[in-house]
Image: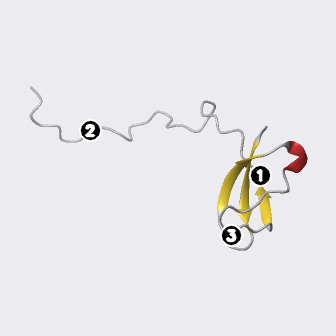
Amino acid sequence: MPFYDYRCEDCGHEFEEQRPVAARDEAECPGCRGRRVRRLVRAVARLSGAGGGPSGGASCSPVGRSGFG
Ligand SMILES: [Zn+2]
């Protein structure tokens, strides 16, 4: 069964629960036992690798490194 993220409409509690696809919209808030929960869309693509990194440059040049040797 897949995991789903939910947020309670009553108390605002966010939780994760493993539920069958057929009953993914029938979650219950573990905080207030409320049934008014909204299913959140989980961002699956969170793999780092393509793009989004420090691209070359002199941004991290050690300045004034004394006492080396
Ligand atoms: Zn709640």
Return the disc, 3 or 1, that comes first in the chain's sequence: 3
Q: Quadrant of the C terminus?
A: top left
**Mark 3 Cβ inside 8 Å of ligand 1:** yes
Rendering quarter of residue 10:
bottom right
Task: Decide which of 49, 27 is in the foreground and name it.
Answer: 27
Is 7 drawn above or below residue 53 in the view shown? below
**Mark 1 Cβ inside 8 Å of ligand 1:** no
Q: State which image quarter holds ligand 1.
A: bottom right
Label 3: element kind: loop
> Residue visible at 79% across and 57% down?
27
- CA separation in Å, label 3 and label 2: 53 Å
Residue 3 point in image, percent of width and height: 73, 43
Is 12 drawn above or below residue 3 in the view shown? below
Q: Name the residue under label 2.
A: 62
Task: Decide which of 54, 23 is in the foreground and name it.
Answer: 23
Q: Residue reaching furthest right? A: 22
Q: Name the residue under label 1.
A: 41
Q: How crowded is mark 3: few (under 14 residues within 10 Å), some or many (20 or more)?
A: few
- CA separation in Å, label 3 and label 1: 22 Å
Amino acid type indicated by mark 3: Cys
Rendering quarter of residue 40:
bottom right
The image's mark for residue 30 is none
Amino acid type indicated by mark 2: Pro
Q: Mark 3 points at which residue?
A: 32
Label 2: element kind: loop
Q: Are marks 3 and 2 in contact (CB under 8 Å)?
A: no
Q: Residues within 10 Å of mark 2 (few under 14, many from 20)?
A: few
> Which mark's residue is nearer the viewer, 3 or 1?
3
